[in-house]
Amino acid sequence: MPTVLILNGPNLNMLGLREPTIYGAETLKDLEARCCARAEALGLHCDFRQSNMEGELVGWIQQARDGAQGLILNAGAYTHTSVAIHDALRACELPVIEVHLSNIYKREPFRHHSYVSAVAQGVICGFGSHGYELALEALAAILNRNKKG
Ligand code: CA2
């Protein structure tokens, strides 16, 4: 069963506890359960993680090269700042889907640029936690296509 690594960046451990109007009422645990159920239905194994540390996220992206077949990333605020995450994604040579809960283009101008987008296969934003399920569907289709050659 192909493994999809789902990485969540800084402050996403606060989901459901603050700012529900922007990020929804689900907790990170709820989101993990939703992702793992959807992944299983798509024939994928889901490895779901969160970190507030840039270096830890970079390390997990590096390990994914050997340990996973695809990557879903909500890098949180590092989306808009991290050349280190951009470089790690470029080097990991896996299909990457960028996800954001909120529509970053409807928000402050500093959220309009992403260092992830240029190295992602696609970007999903503004659909709340459903965006993660859409990303899993997209990755399942990409992995099936690659399998058939
Ligand atoms: O919309 C998204 O998913 C973001 O990646 C979330 C980041 C933000 O910096 C990006 O611009 C867009 C922030 C995550 C913070 O999550 C919180 C959740 C609840 C309470 C406080 C923060």
Image: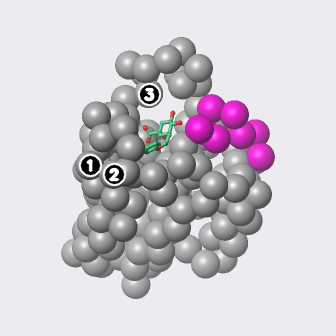
For label 1, the residue is 25
Furthest-top residue in this view = 109
Under tag 1, what secondary structure? loop
Judged left or right of residue 111, residue 140 is left
Q: CA distance from mark 1 to mark 3?
A: 18 Å
Query: Where are the magenta residues, as a range?
Result: 77-84
Residue 16 tag number: 2
Task: Classify 81 as above or below 112.
Answer: below
Q: Is residue 23 highlighted in magenta? A: no
Q: Ligand 1 closer than 8 Å to the CB at disc 3?
A: yes
- Residue 104, which numbered label? 3
How is this picture coloured? one colour
Real-space CA distance between mark 1 and mark 2, rounded to the nearest whole angstrom? 4 Å
Tag 2: Cα neighbours inside 10 Å, few (<14), some, or many (≥20)? some
Mark 3, secondary structure of its residue:
helix
Q: Can you tell me whether the CB of the residue at mark 2 lies under 8 Å from the nearest atom of ligand 1? A: yes
Q: Pick whichever, 25 or 146, lies toward us.
A: 25
Q: Is residue 87 left or right of residue 52?
A: right
Mark 2 and 3 residues: CB-CB less than 8 Å, in contact? no
The residue type indicated by label 2 comes to Gly
> Is disc 1 in contact with disc 2, using a CB cutoff of under 8 Å?
yes
Frontmost of labels 1 and 3 is 1
Query: Do the CB atoms of the residues marked 1 and 3 lie less than 8 Å apart?
Result: no
Q: Camera-side residue: 1 or 15?
A: 15
Find residue 29 and report its horizontal and vertical position in percent: 36, 67
Figure quadrant of residue 114: top right
Which sits in the foreground, 134 or 93?
134
Q: Secondary structure at mark 2?
A: loop
Question: Does label 2 or label 3 sit earlier along the sequence?
Answer: 2
Q: Position of residue 131 (x, y in %)?
A: 31, 47
Q: Where is residue 94? Give x, y as percent.
A: 58, 61
